[in-house]
Amino acid sequence: MELVVHKITGEPTEKKIQLSEEIFGVEPNDHAIYLDVKQYLANNRQGTHKTKERNEIRGSNRKIKRQKGTGTARAGSKKSPIFIGGGRVFGPRPRDYSFKLNKKVKRLARRSALSYKAQGQHIIVLEDFNFEAPKTKKFIEFLNAFQAGNSKNLLVMNGVDKNVVLSARNIQRAKVVTAATLNTYDVMNANKLFFVESSLDTIQSILG
């Protein structure tokens, strides 16, 4: 697939770039995408949820009423789960949600996600650029130049550019990542993908 390289002002340049069919033109595998997104979300879970069970509730163990003759069920302690303030039955405990996924599956998932975006013509290639200083207004102007102000956007840089990252930080629907940290979830979650020209070489070396 051949794409025209654009300036950040939205104007097309005379340069064209050929996207690798090995990465942007494969037959998408939906199950691989599902597994990779599932792992990404699971690995981001803190897993620090905790409720107190019966043996962890503070209070007296005294029997609260006599065993028989009350006309109600027998009860031995106020810590019982049937009473307000009692312990919870089988409540959540801290746990690790992360799981392992094979590298080949993760690579296939990223190729599949990028191929979906390429098929839908949601990929835009930009000339390499940087900002002299952090400017949110300048980043918004860049998005508006491509009529992407109201959609979810992902900008893929070749390396970390602090000024660009800070410029996009306060924009809710924009995210800046490096080519080395590009993941399936971010690709599928974005409506438009912006790649700076040099980032495509890094992606080729990682996924090619």
Image (cartoon, rainbow, N blue to C red):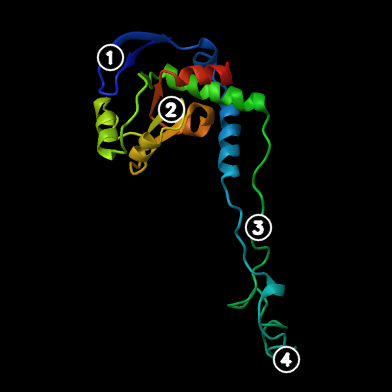
* Location of mark 3 (residue): 94
Q: Earlier in the sequence, mark 2 or mark 3?
A: 3
Residues packed near mark 3 inside 10 Å, few (<14), some (14 to 19) or many (20 plus) = few
Type of amino acid at the residue the image marks with label 4: Arg
Q: Earlier in the sequence, mark 4 or mark 1?
A: 1
Type of amino acid at the residue the image marks with label 1: Pro
Residues packed near mark 2 inside 10 Å, few (<14), some (14 to 19) or many (20 plus) = many
How far apart marks 2 and 3 lie (CA) works out to 35 Å
Q: Mark 2 or 4, which is nearer the eye?
A: 2
Residue at the image point whose x is 31% and y is 32% from the top? 132
Measured from the top left, where is residue 117 in percent x and y?
44, 22
How far apart marks 2 and 1 lie (CA) works out to 19 Å
Type of amino acid at the residue the image marks with label 2: Val
Measured from the top left, where is residue 25 in percent x and y?
50, 13
Q: How many marks?
A: 4
Are discs 2 and 3 less than 8 Å apart at CB? no
Are discs 2 and 1 less than 8 Å apart at CB? no
Residue at the image point whose x is 72% and y is 85% from the top? 61
Quadrant location of the C terminus in the rendered image: top right
* Location of mark 2 (residue): 156
Circle 4 — which element?
A: loop
Residue at the image point whose x is 61% and y is 78% from the top? 83
Residue at the image point whose x is 57% and y is 25% from the top? 109
Are discs 4 and 3 less than 8 Å apart at CB? no
